[in-house]
C-alpha cells in the first residue's frame, strides 16, 4: 500500500467531478482560494499558524500515478481526454501564506493559492486536512506553554493522536509552539526535535520488584535515568529512588528525574520532593503526566507544586476541547473578478487579501486589519509569497519558526493569553476597500 | 519522505529505551498485553470494534530500515549489539481480537498480543494510535446509523479528519458501521467503498450564473447529477432545478438529487420538496449536509423533514463529542505469571482474558462476562485468534464486517441504542476466576 498522504486521490470525489466539468468547458482561468478560520472555537482567543511545510510538500509532489489513473478510468466517470490531462497534472501555482508560528485570528487568510482553477480546486480537501490538524495542536500547545512558564513540556500524544500523520503533526506543531520536545521517535529523526522518554508501568510490572526494574533501566540507559514511580506506591518508590541514587552514584550514574502518572499529582509531587530533598536528591527533577491539559497545568502550578516538567498527551494530540476548526478554503477571485459565497450565515469577504497588524509604541498589539492585497493600510503585513510556479521560495528551519512563535506569544495582549475566553477578543477590522469590493460583488451577482 | 505509518520509529522513545534494558537483561519471556477501553465516554453507550485490519497490516510489515537504524545509532542511546538485533527484528507473536464490526464495552479486551516482551512492548504506541481512531469513528457512525434509519449516510469528513491516515480510517470505519459510502476517493480505490460526490459552492461561484454551473456539471457528469442549491438563494435554485430537469430530460439526463448545506435544513428541505414535487420532480432526492451529527439527524427526521440522505463530516471524522478514548494496552501476564497495574484509579484485571456474551431466547443481549481465557463461563466468545507467528490467520472481506455490524446494531438493547446515556448501562460481569486471580496477583506483589 502506498502512502495515502502522497496521493491526489486523497480528496473528495466532487473535486474530480468538478474538474471534469471545468475540463469540458475549457475553464483554466486563474482562481484565487484562501484558507481561513471562520470563527475561533469558544475556548481559543487566538490560533497559531502551522502545517505550511506539509502543505507545500504536498503541492510540490502532487501527481497521479498509473494505478490511480487506471482506477479513475475503470470508474467510468471520466473521459479519456480528461484522464490523459490528469496524467500530466502538476501544481504550477503560487502560494502566499502566514509563516508558521505566527498568531492569527478569525477571518484572516492563513494561506492563499493562486492557480488555474482545476489545480486550485483539486487541492482543497487535502490542504484543509493538513492545516487544520497542525493549527489545532500548535494552538493548544501554545496555551500549555503560556500556563507553564519555565517548565519542560513534552509531547506524549502519539498514541492518542488520530493516526500516523496526526502523531507526526502533533510532535512538530507542539515543538513550534514552545514544547521542549516529543516522545515520538520518528519526529526526532525527521525534524531533529529533541526526544524524551522514561519507562512504562509494564516495565516495572515485568520485573520481580520496582527496585529491580529501576536498576535494570538505569544500567541500560545511564544517560537518561528517569524513573516511573507510581506503579504500586508512589511514596515508597520515591524512597527507593533515594536509596538507589547512592548505589548508582558509585557507578557514576545520575538519576535525572522521576515521573508520576496518576493520583493527586500536586499533592504527590510535594511529598516526593520532600522525600528526595531529605535524601540528598535535590537534583532529581519531578515530571508529571496523566490526563494533563493547560487548565491542570495552571492549577498544579498555582498550587505551588514543585514540578519541573510535564508530559502532555491526549488533550494536546486531539485538541480535546476544540477537536476541529470552522475552517474553509474559499474561492475569492476567478478570471480576474472577485467572488463571494453568500450562503446563509456563511458569507465570506471577496478578493485577494492581506492582513496587517498594528502595534503601539511598546510593541503591544492594537488590532489587525483584513484588507485587499495591495490596499494602503497601516500595519505589518502577515502574508508572504512562499511558492512561485509550483516551487517553494525557501524552507524555513524549524528553529526560526519556533523563535517566531515564542516572540509572538511574548507580545500577546494579556487578555488573549489567559485561559478564559477574552470578551470581546482581539479586533480584526475590515478595510474600506474590502467593504467596497464586497458591495460591488453583491451588485454584480444579485 | 517515507510513510510514517510504516515506520517502527513511529513510537514513544521509552519503548526503545525499555527494549534496550530488556535486551541487556536477556529478557525475552512471553508477554501478554491487552488493549481495552477503561471507561466509555459519557456520550457513548457502546463502542464498535474497528482498526484490526490496519493493526495486523502494521504488525506483519514491521521492520527497521537502514536509515532508521543509522539514526538510532547516532543518537548514542543504544548499544551496537542491540542495534544489530533490531536490524533482524520481526513481529513473530500471536494476536487474538474481536472481529471488526463487533460491539464492545468498557474493560473488555478488543485485542490481545502474545509475544516475546520486546516485540509486544515495541508495538504498544502504534497499536493504540491505530485502534483508537478507527473505534472512535465506527462508534460515532453507528450512532448516526441508528438515528437515521433507511437514509443514505455518506462520510464527508476527509478534510476535517486529523491528517491522511485518519481520513482513510474515517471512510472505512463509517462504512463498517453502516454508512452507504464516502466522498474520499482513495478509500474507494483501496477498499471498493462506494464513493459519493456532488459539487462545491466554488463551482457555482466560478460560473456566470447558477443555471450555467448546474448545466455544465450535468453535461460533464450525466450519470451523477446532484446539484448544490444553497450558494445564493436555495428556493430560487430549487425552481431552477425544476426548469433544468425538463431541459436535461430532452438530452436523456436525469437529475438525481439536490444538496442543501446551510440555513434551516429541516425547513428548507420541506420547501424544496414542495417546489420539486409541484414541478413534477418527485424523483429528485434531497441530501443535507453542514455541521450534522447524530443529534441533528434525529431532530431533522423527528421534524418530519423529507430527507433522503445526509453527508456527515467534521463531527464524524473527529468524533467531536468524544475525540479520544480512555484506552490502554496493558501487560496482563509475563513469563507465565499474571500481572496487574495498581496505580491509583487505574487498576486492571490481570491474566489472559476472554469476553462472553449471553443472550435471552429472543437474541436480546443480557450481559457480558469478563473471564479468564479458558474459564468455563456461559455465553458466546467474542475474541478469536487472528494472527499466529506473525502471520494473519485470514483477512475478512469488508462486506462481512459490515454485515456483522448491522446485525450487532439490530440486536442492541434499546436503552443502549438511544442517544441519551443509558443508566446503568450494559452489564459487564467479572467472572469468579478473574476475581480470584486478581487477589492472587495482589498477594504476590504486595
Image: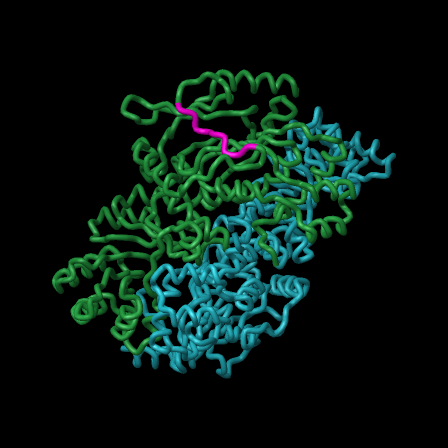
Chain colours: A green, B cyan
Left or right: where A17 falls relative to A255: right
Does residue B310 show up magenta in the picture? no
Q: How many marks?
A: 0
The percent coordinates of residue A279 (x first, y second) are: 13, 64
Residue A247 seen from this side:
yes
Does residue A387 show up magenta in the picture? yes
The percent coordinates of residue A378 (x first, y second) are: 40, 18
The percent coordinates of residue A163 (x first, y second) are: 50, 55
Taking depth in this image into account, of B206 and B260 the one nearest to the observer is B206
Q: Quadrant of residue B352?
A: bottom left
Taking depth in this image into account, of B311 and B185 the one nearest to the observer is B185
Q: Which residues are magenta?
A: A380-388
Q: Is residue A139 above or below residue A70?
A: above
Q: Is residue B71 above or below residue A176?
A: below
The quarter of the rendered structure image containing the C terminus of chain A is top right
Left or right: where B348 falls relative to A73: left
Q: Quadrant of residue B97?
A: bottom right
Q: Is residue A150 above or below residue B274?
A: below
Q: Quadrant of residue B362?
A: bottom right
Taking depth in this image into account, of B259 and A259 the one nearest to the observer is A259
* Dominant SS type (magenta): strand
The percent coordinates of residue B220 (x first, y second) are: 77, 37
The quarter of the rendered structure image containing the N terminus of chain A is bottom right
Q: Residue at x 56, y 24 (%)?
A: A350
The outermost residue toward the right is B250
Left or right: where A266 falls relative to B426: left
Residue B150 seen from this side:
no
Amino acid at each position: 500500500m502506498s502512502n495515502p498522504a502522497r496521493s491526489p486521490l486523497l480528496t473528495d470525489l466532487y473535486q474530480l467531478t468538478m474538474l471534469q466539468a471545468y475540463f469540458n468547458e475549457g475553464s483554466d482561468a486563474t482562481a484565487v482560494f484562501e484558507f481561513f478560520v471562520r470563527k475561533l472555537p469558544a475556548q481559543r482567543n487566538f490560533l497559531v499558524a502551522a502545517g505550511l511545510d506539509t502543505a507545500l510538500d504536498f503541492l510540490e509532489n502532487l501527481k497521479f500515478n498509473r494505478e490511480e489513473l487506471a482506477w479513475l478510468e475503470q470508474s467510468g466517470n471520466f473521459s479519456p481526454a480528461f484522464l490523459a490531462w490528469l496524467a500530466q497534472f502538476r501544481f504550477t501555482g503560487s502560494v502566499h501564506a502566514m509563516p508558521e508560528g505566527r498568531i492569527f485570528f478569525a477571518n484572516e487568510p492563513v494561506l492563499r493559492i493562486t492557480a488555474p482553477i482545476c489545480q486550485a480546486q483539486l487541492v482543497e480537501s487535502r490542504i484543509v486536512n493538513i492545516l487544520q490538524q497542525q493549527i489545532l495542536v500548535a494552538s493548544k500547545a501554545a496555551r500549555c506553554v503560556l500556563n507553564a512558564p519555565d517548565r519542560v513540556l513534552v509531547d506524549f500524544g502519539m498514541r492518542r493522536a488520530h493516526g500516523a500523520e496526526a502523531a507526526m503533526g502533533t510532535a512538530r506543531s507542539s515543538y513550534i509552539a514552545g514544547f521542549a520536545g516529543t516522545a515520538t521517535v520518528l519526529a526526532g529523526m525527521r525534524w531533529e526535535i529533541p526526544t524524551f522518554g522514561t519507562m512504562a508501568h509494564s516495565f516495572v510490572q515485568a520485573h520481580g520488584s520496582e527496585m529491580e526494574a529501576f536498576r535494570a533501566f538505569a544500567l541500560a540507559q545511564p544517560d537518561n535515568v528517569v524513573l516511573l514511580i507510581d506503579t504500586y506506591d508512589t511514596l515508597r518508590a520515591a524512597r527507593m529512588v533515594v536509596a538507589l541514587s547512592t548505589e548508582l552514584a558509585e557507578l557514576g550514574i545520575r538519576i535525572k528525574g522521576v515521573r508520576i502518572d496518576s493520583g493527586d499529582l500536586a499533592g504527590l509531587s510535594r511529598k516526593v520532593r520532600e522525600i528526595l530533598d531529605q535524601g540528598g536528591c535535590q537534583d532529581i527533577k519531578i515530571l508529571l503526566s496523566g490526563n494533563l491539559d493547560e487548565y491542570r497545568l495552571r492549577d498544579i502550578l498555582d498550587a505551588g507544586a514543585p514540578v519541573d516538567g510535564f508530559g502532555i498527551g491526549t488533550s494536546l494530540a486531539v485538541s480535546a476541547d476544540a477537536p476541529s476548526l470552522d475552517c474553509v478554503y474559499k474561492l475569492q477571485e476567478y478570471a480576474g473578478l472577485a467572488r463571494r459565497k453568500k450562503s446563509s450565515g456563511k458569507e465570506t469577504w471577496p478578493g485577494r487579501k492581506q492582513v496587517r497588524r498594528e502595534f503601539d509604541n511598546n510593541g503591544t498589539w492594537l488590532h489587525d486589519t483584513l484588507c485587499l492585497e495591495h490596499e494602503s493600510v497601516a500595519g505589518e503585513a502577515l502574508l508572504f509569497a512562499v511558492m512561485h510556479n509550483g516551487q517553494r521560495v525557501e524552507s524555513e528551519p524549524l528553529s526560526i519558526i519556533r523563535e517566531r512563535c515564542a516572540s509572538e506569544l511574548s507580545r500577546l495582549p494579556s487578555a488573549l493569553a489567559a485561559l478564559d475566553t477574552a470578551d470581546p477578543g482581539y479586533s480584526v477590522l475590515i478595510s474600506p476597500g474590502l467593504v467596497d469590493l464586497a458591495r460591488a460583488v453583491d451588485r454584480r451577482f444579485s
